[in-house]
Image: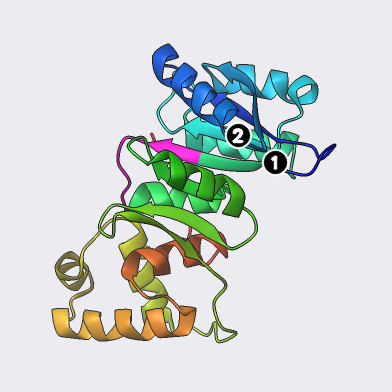
Amino acid sequence: MESGARSVRVLVVEDHRVVGEAFRAAIDLEDGFECVGVVSSVGAAVALLPRADPDVVLMDVRLPGVDGIQGTRQIKAAKPSVRVLIVSAHTDVEVVAWAAAAGASAVLTKEVALADMVTALNAAGTSGMVVDDLALGKTVSFGSAPPDRHLTEREREILALLSGGLNPKSIAARTGISVETVRGHLKSIMGKLGAHSQVEAVVIAASEGLTSLAPLS
């Protein structure tokens, strides 16, 4: 890091004190990063924003009171330039999609390696949404999709059901069409969105407002 350059300021929102302090220690040990606070709730994080002036908020998805998804919306509303990294005990389609819709820059698991967390801290907000992909065992970045956005009415219906957590068999039962037809539509949807997987399609759709997603209850 160049002399005089500002460190990346990270605010941690985590209701488990030991975990929060572990994040603080890991961040402070990394050159170019500075933990500017550890708080246990979204309300405390929003109140601290003006004084702490974070560049990044590292936030647990499960918090007392306001959860991390709603918290992302509140923090982005208070400080639009801040990057929010959601941390979850486990990722799934719904968490990733809701986080994208709320404006999060990344979704990480609590088991993420320090090197991958630093990669996400550096990449968030510069190369699409970063997601810790447990299936691949590495962090991946979902970049921008190609210009073709014309989804048919049926494709939008299937995409909405997929975003709601239904698999192709359940979507087929819900829509009254065959599983193979559903898979054909999903292939078309992924092609139009420039997605390489169904999860990536959900993330892109949510981030671009192509689907309407409910927050975590």
Q: Quadrant of residue 73?
A: top right
Instruction: Identify the residue at image location x=23%, y=81%.
Output: 183
Q: Nearer the viewer, residue 28 or 55?
A: 28
Q: Would you place residue 1 above or below residue 57 in this image?
A: below
* Disc 1 and disc 2 in contact, CB within 8 angstroms: yes
Find the distance from the CA under tag 1 to the CA under tag 2: 7 Å
Residue 110, percent from left and from top: 36, 35
Question: Does 22 appear in magenta?
Answer: no
Q: Would you place residue 99 above or below residue 53 in this image?
A: below
Query: Counting other residues with Cα less than 10 Å from the Cα at mark 1, is it few (<14), some (14-19), or many (20 or more)?
Result: many
Q: Which numbered disc, 1 or 2, marks the residue that appears first in the sequence? A: 2
Residue 57, numbered label: 2
Instruction: Identify the residue at image location x=52%, y=49%.
Output: 120
* In the displayed structure image, the side of residue 32 where residue 98 appears, left or right: left
Q: Amino acid at mark 1?
A: Val
Q: Quadrant of residue 88?
A: top left
Question: Does 89 appear in magenta?
Answer: yes
Residue 78, percent from left and from top: 74, 34
Residue 136 in sight here: yes
Q: Would you place residue 21 above or below residue 195 in this image?
A: above
Q: Nearer the viewer, residue 176 or 163?
A: 163
Which span is picked out in magenta?
Answer: 86-92
Q: Which residue is mark 1?
A: 82
Instruction: Identify the residue at image location x=48%, y=66%.
Output: 205
Q: Amino acid at mark 2?
A: Val
Residue 212, numbered label: none
Instruction: Identify the residue at image location x=26%, y=86%.
Output: 184
Task: Identify the residue at the far right of this view.
Answer: 4
